[in-house]
Image: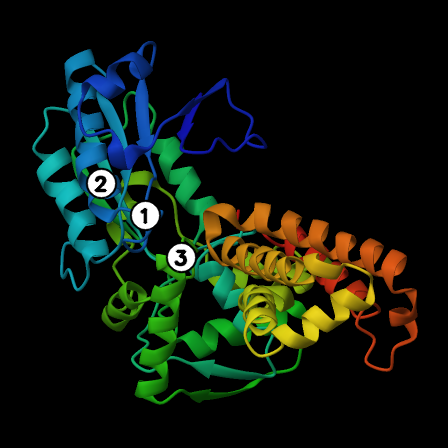
Amino acid sequence: MIGLARRPHRQLKVAGWVTLDIASAHQPEKWLAHLDGVDAVVNCAGVLQDSARENTAGVHAAGVGALFAACEQTGVRRIIHLSAIGVDRAQPSRFSATKYAGDQLFLMARDLEWVILRPSVVLGRPAFGASALIRALASLPVVPFMAGTQALQVVQLDDVLATVSFFLKPDAPSRLALELAGPDRLQMGEIIAQYRSWYGWRPARSFTLPRPLSRFLYWVGDLAGALGWRPPVRTNAAREIARGAVGDPERWTSISGIRARSLADALAAELATIQDKWFARLYLIKPILFAILPAFWIGTGVISVWLEYDSGVDLMRSTGAGVLSGPAVVAGALGDIAVGICIVWRPLTRYGLYGALALSLFYVVAGTMLRPDLWIDPLGPLLKIVPIFVLHLVALAILDER
């Protein structure tokens, strides 16, 4: 088995990895060399919304369209394509519109043995996106629900994987599209309640956010997406969830013999671990942490060169910096601002956190050498660096998304 990704997942054991950005691979020629010796292709690439790191049309349509054309040219006949439930019924966002275009225009028109699987919200032990958000909401004693949320027929990851394995068999049927939906139509509150029971926690109270507040939170998610982050709460999610994620699993079962497990049965099969509980509680803290840290560094830098510039210069002069006092204050402020910008811009976040750790150590060492009395200052300017340093270590520990 060969895996393909922009950034290979080294923990997934496969025969080899191909590094390729699907969104930019618009020509079949970019795929041909990677199909040597390949018997079948499973495409599960997908992105929620256009952003600095995501291109819905490129990933869902143009890129995979070139892949399907290359498969046709090289004789790779069997294609298992993961789409999304409901995209054939309505396309309220570019997510579903491009998914449907990839299904209909770029795959179904090809002379290939294609199978299109359209799962509902997929839940399993790994958690990312909507599944991670559901677990996190279940950790709250009072759960806020977005206005406009509709019913879901969540499907288990193991059932999806079993279906992919079934259709990879050479004699499996092809040229069909199936909805992969769980047996139960659940409201979000019912899903949250089942997860809280799984965690061993008492039932939570809940309320629905006013629509203006819901729209504001989706806008905040869009802003985070523009900065390269991948929050599940974004405008496309609002549009898609308003349609609901429900379907009829009977055709899936009749063809594959796989009967979808209910969420209750899936949760009952495995006990929740302390790691599951940690993840749920930390998930909602993470966006707060990555909003506060850049605000802290950028705000510190701006204050240093604007409101408190004279105080900063006086402090540097007290260390004997002399004529270098002003430039030192400016340099420190620019360093702080640069660190904050790197932390908030997702492609550079890790470097920003390392930069923050380095600056913090520098400030502690320099302060200790030049003004050791600051350790016992009532305001604790040096002492406060210690919890700040630890907070950045926490941010590094929870940075990875999947």
From the top left corner, tell me how far across and down residue 285 is, in percent. 60, 69
Q: Which residue is mark 1?
A: 54
From the top left corner, tell me how far across and down residue 198 is, in percent. 62, 67
Is residue 109 rendered to the left or right of residue 2? left
Report the mark closest to the observer, 1 or 3.
3
Rate crowding at label 2 as few (under 14), some (14 to 19) or many (20 or more) other CA atoms within 10 Å: many
Say whether residue 390 is visible. Answer: yes
Q: CA distance from mark 3 to mark 2?
A: 19 Å
At numbered mark 2, what does the secondary structure look like: helix, strand or loop? helix
Type of amino acid at the residue the image marks with label 2: Gly
Going from N to C along the chain, the mark reached first, 3 or 2, is 2
Image height check: is 335 above or below 191?
Answer: above
- In the picture, the disc for residue 227 is 3
Q: CA distance from mark 1 to mark 3?
A: 11 Å
Image height check: is 21 above or below 287?
Answer: above
Type of amino acid at the residue the image marks with label 1: Glu
Quick one: 37 or 195, which is closer to the camera? 37
At numbered mark 3, what does the secondary structure look like: helix, strand or loop? loop
Q: Which residue is mark 2?
A: 58
| Res. 210 image quadrant | bottom left
CB atoms at circles 3 and 2 under 8 Å apart?
no
Is residue 337 rendered to the left or right of residue 242? right
| Res. 337 image quadrant | bottom right
Q: Which residue: 34% across, 39% down?
A: 44
| Res. 37 image quadrant | top left
Q: Residue furthest front?
A: 323
Type of amino acid at the residue the image marks with label 3: Leu
